[in-house]
Amino acid sequence: MIRSMYKATAGAAAALMLIGVTSSVYGFVGSYSALTRISREIQLTGRVICTNCTMNEARKTQPKYSNHLYRLTLEQQPVIMEVYQTTSTAWLNHLMMPHFRVRGEGNLLLPLTSQDNVRKDVTIVGSLMDEQTLHVREITVH
């Protein structure tokens, strides 16, 4: 009986070690389950840099802030935004690339794509649908 208990304990320890080695070999690639530690309600404040432009074009106009630039995809139209305040830095740090999708009801997203709001401060309030998609409930142009 003692011998079988020793084998079971040794087997369990070996399995746990194997799991630890395997996960460190593959590394953390991110998953939706990782968002359980991140608040699902997000508020972003920043400035619309440009619409229908590339990240490289935006970086040329904002070299000092290029590490705070994010590409928001609304349908097929990209918007580059400098994000300088958020309620969830963990979510922004979790993103593999400085890019995420934005979804919203009806004409709610129009202020982000309007040329009139380029270089204006914008606050976006929404909730995460998955690790790369923000469902917007409110946009305020300041």
Image (cartoon, rainbow, N blue to C red):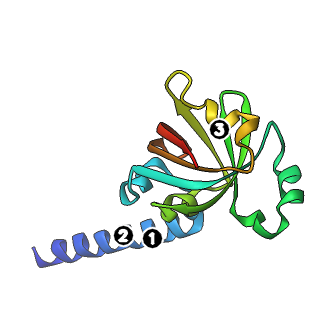
Residue named by callout 3: 112
Secondary element under disc 1, as helix, strand or loop, is helix
Report if the CB atoms under discs 1 and 2 are less than 8 Å apart: yes
43 in relation to 111, above or below: below
Amino acid at circle 2: Leu
Horizontal side of residue 38 vs 71, given as left or right = left
Q: For the residues carrying marks 2 and 3, which lies nearer the camera in this image? A: 3
Residue 45: x and y in percent read: 56, 55
- What residue is drawn where x is 45% and y is 60%? 87
Q: What residue would you read off at disc 1?
A: 20
Instruction: Work out which residue is located at the far top of the displayed protein and give it.
Output: 106
The amino acid on which the numbered mark 3 sits, given as a three-letter code, is Leu
Q: Residues within 10 Å of mark 2 (few under 14, many from 20)?
A: few
User: Disc 2 to disc 3, how far (Cα)?
Assistant: 49 Å
Q: Residue at x 58, y 49 (%)?
A: 142
Quadrant containing the N terminus in the rendered view? bottom left
Above or below, 12 against 109 in this view is below
Task: Please tell me whether mark 3 sits on a helix, a strand or a loop.
Answer: helix
Label 1 with label 3: CB-CB less than 8 Å = no
Mark in the foreground, 1 or 3: 3
